[in-house]
Image (cartoon, grey):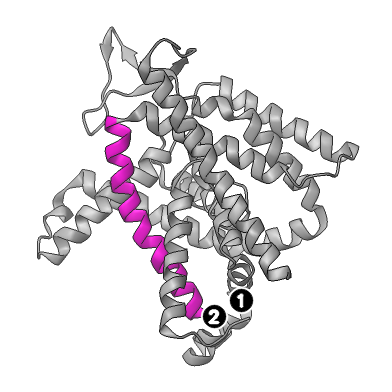
Amino acid sequence: MARERNLLDKFFLFLKGLSMGAANKVPGVSGGTVSFVLGFYEEMIYSFRKINYKAFLLLINGRFKSFYEYTNATFLLLVFGGSTFSYFTVSLALDYLLRHYELYVWSSFFGMILGSIYYISKDFNDWRTRNIVSMIIGAIIGIALSFMSPAKENDNLWFVFACGIIGVSGMTLPGLSGSFILILMGNYVLLLVDSVAMLFKTITEVFTGDFSFVDNLERMKYLKVIASFTGGSAFGLIVTSHILGYVLKYWHQIVTALIIGFITGSLGMVWPWKKEVYKVENGVNLFDAQGNKIVENFKRFLPNLSSQETWIAIFFILLGASIILLIDKYGTERKDYIDE
């Protein structure tokens, strides 16, 4: 699977990693889907599975060149270099957009999730009882989560580590959005917006010779959070690539049915028209460390169809769905071209 690459190949592989990283950041879009569409999914899973006991032996025995070649490290470094770069750039953009255009951002996310449901389900044609039951179970779980109070932000480092393991699943399983799962777990903004923005700010300061962040307790908290999340993601990539290889081999349709049901049932979590209900204690709003009001719940409502803002939001829903449909169309045309 590993092969020699010229400079142009490496550049395009970096761009593909950039696309996958951006997709992983957006709720409703699966990085695994993008890697599948752009034609490097199989090599990615192959490379992950090469990080095993044999690779460990090569490393501790000092056979670094053999380790590099065995693990297809050129591929991994380029793909994850692109993904890491996109995480910083997309994080900063999302932070701005969520603050100033929240309705339109969530409308786009909602449309992307609708498109993802279509993407996963369009080729699903195995309607045996066990698959229908799996789909129903997934939908029940999703609906239950939608109507429950959203999970509160949790910066416990062990929970953050678990978020890394679960959130990275979007890279290894096409159709499953890791960012969407992080929304359900309550840590999307903490892990993919705030912490990444703090890390970017810290790196910028380090390059200018400013190390004052070491004495900043809030900054150090975010750095610990992003380190735990990164560790969980790396662990999850290695472990889930082996587990999913086995699970998908023997229970592919059941897993697909479960995912379709779950994502469909969970649409209420990203319903664009909702009002934040803030946490109050003794009649006074509570604030987090950054001075923002702490959100306790969301009150969902139907949009006002006479409002121009509503129709702009509907446009963004259609735009989000169209992005997924275009990716699907490109993937279909590419597959047909390869088959010819």
Q: Which residue is drawn at 63% across and 54% down?
A: 173
> Residue 96: x percent and y percent?
27, 39
Q: Does the magenta stretch include residue 22?
A: no
The residue tagged with tag 1: helix, strand or loop?
loop
Above or below — where is 77 with respect to 121?
Answer: below
| Amino acid beneath label 2 | Asn
Foreground: 56 or 293?
293
Residue 181 in sight here? no
Above or below — where is 309 with respect to 28?
Answer: above
Q: Mark 2 points at which residue?
A: 72
Query: Would you say the magenta stretch is mainly helix, strand or loop?
Result: helix
Q: How crowded is mark 2: few (under 14 residues within 10 Å), some or many (20 or more)?
A: many
Are the two marked residues, 1 and 2, in contact with CB atoms closer than 8 angstroms?
Answer: yes
Answer left or right for 264 relative to 136. Answer: left
| Amino acid beneath label 1 | Lys
The residue tagged with tag 2: helix, strand or loop?
loop
Q: Name the residue under label 1.
A: 50
Q: How crowded is mark 1: few (under 14 residues within 10 Å), some or many (20 or more)?
A: many
Count of numbered circles on the image? 2
Residue 310 in sight here? yes
Quadrant of image for the N terminus: bottom right
Bounds of the magenta segment: 71-100
Q: Quadrant of residue 94?
A: top left
